[in-house]
Image: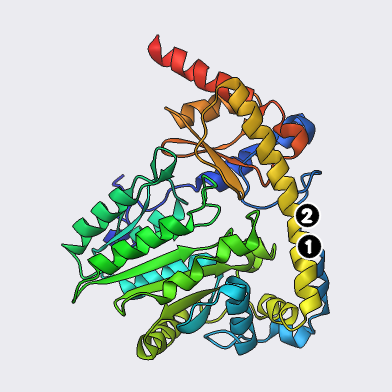
Amino acid sequence: MSKQMPIAAPHTWGKYTPDKIFTVVSKATQAKEAYGREVVVNGAPGTFLDETETIYCLPTVESVYRSIPMNEVVAYSPLEGAPDFLEAAVQHVFREFRPAAHIKAVATPGGTGALHNIVANYTSVGDAILSSEWCWGPYKSIAEDALRKFETFSLFAGDRFNLEELEEKMTALLAKQERLVVILNTPSHNPTGYSMTNDEWKAVLNSAKKLAMPGRFIILAIDVAYLDYTEDQSASRSFFPLLADLPENVLPIICFSMSKSFTLYGQRVGAMIGVSPNAQIADEFFETNQITCRASWSSINRGASKVLATIYANPELIKQCDEERAAALNIIKSRAALFSSEAKAAGLEFLPYRSGFFLTIPCQKPEEVCQVLNKANVFLVPLAKGIRISVCAVPTSKMSGLAVKIKKAIERVTVQGNQ
């Protein structure tokens, strides 16, 4: 019998690849059913789980969501998002650090939707998107699904941001294409937990100014998914005013999501926020991306967007959310500190971590190391050059001793490889 010819278009052939994170979560769930949840470490989810391993929602968010009238929940949102939601998103992202520039926002289904629109509207088929080699895997999928390429630069030079290689890669790509999208995930980078300093931001923006010659355009896609999971909320936002001091052919676009900041992961609500010194460019940003929303998902979840608008209409609700989020952050910080301390004692190397949901162990053969850990009922996410640990999801009781288990698994794989 002859092999069935694919019905899908040729550019989609071979497209299927199981998502690593959801695959690992599934394995951990099966292990819990087989052996009991108390003996299984699930370090894969990108959601905050409390100390009982229950997914957490900010109590104020839950209360507000349940108060939204049903006619608001089920109605369509405007294509660009409701005005009160968009203003709330801008207020939440910038707070007291709003850039002195023209700012426009368009609603998207989470930060992923914002990235989709950026790739669709600010690059051409065959162009390359640039991000760091340690990055959230779907960046590559979003680029390649849109028939773009995905290239990377080394994130670190020692324990600092690798500005030199970023500028080198930007220069090379701008010699071949008119527009370049650069995705930077900060603060609390996924998967390392690194946050760029203001000095590093100044250096990146100076490079962009230098490289954005006439006829060349740089779009800085700033993924702030973990903006609210830093120790100092003001410090994490203090780089935003720097975005106002850019030439017209450099366009920063902030990718905001309610998933992490407001624990509404599955509701898929966010926004893309454009910042420009030129009102015409800001208007073009709004109009272009609004049409792409219509052509992609139509409009976002109205009920969840109304939650943010309601919260930002009441300073007391904002304060309550901040306090509740801070309590969750303290738990994450405590878990990360415990792991870091035990990792250092065990001689286990990990990448520079400052804050956020994840930290990363660089290693050889991460798939094999994770397979060894799976046999001990430890489930972590294998990356290309290391292993990601969700400090947001592993309770403190199970975090203790985890570093030693990882160290031993790496040593075992290394010994097997040398035999």
Residue 226 image position (x, y, % from top left): 59, 58
Q: Is residue 69 left or right of residue 109?
A: right
Q: Tell me if residue 145 can be seen.
A: no
**CB atoms of marks 1 and 2 within 8 Å:** yes
**Looking at the rendering, in which quadrant would you find the N terminus?**
top left
Image quadrant where one finds the C terminus: top left
User: Residue at the location (16% across, 62% down)?
Assistant: 175
- Relative to 406, residue 14 above or below: below
How would you rate the neighbour count of disc 2 (Cα within 10 Å): few for under 14, some for 14-19, many for 20 or more? few
Residue named by callout 2: 327
Question: Real-space Cα distance between discs 1 and 2?
Answer: 6 Å
Tag 1 residue: 323
Residue 190 shows in the view:
yes
Q: Position of residue 53 (x, y in %)?
A: 77, 45
In the picture as drawn, the residue positioned furthest to the front comes out as 199
SS at mark 2 in the image:
helix
Secondary structure found at label 1: helix
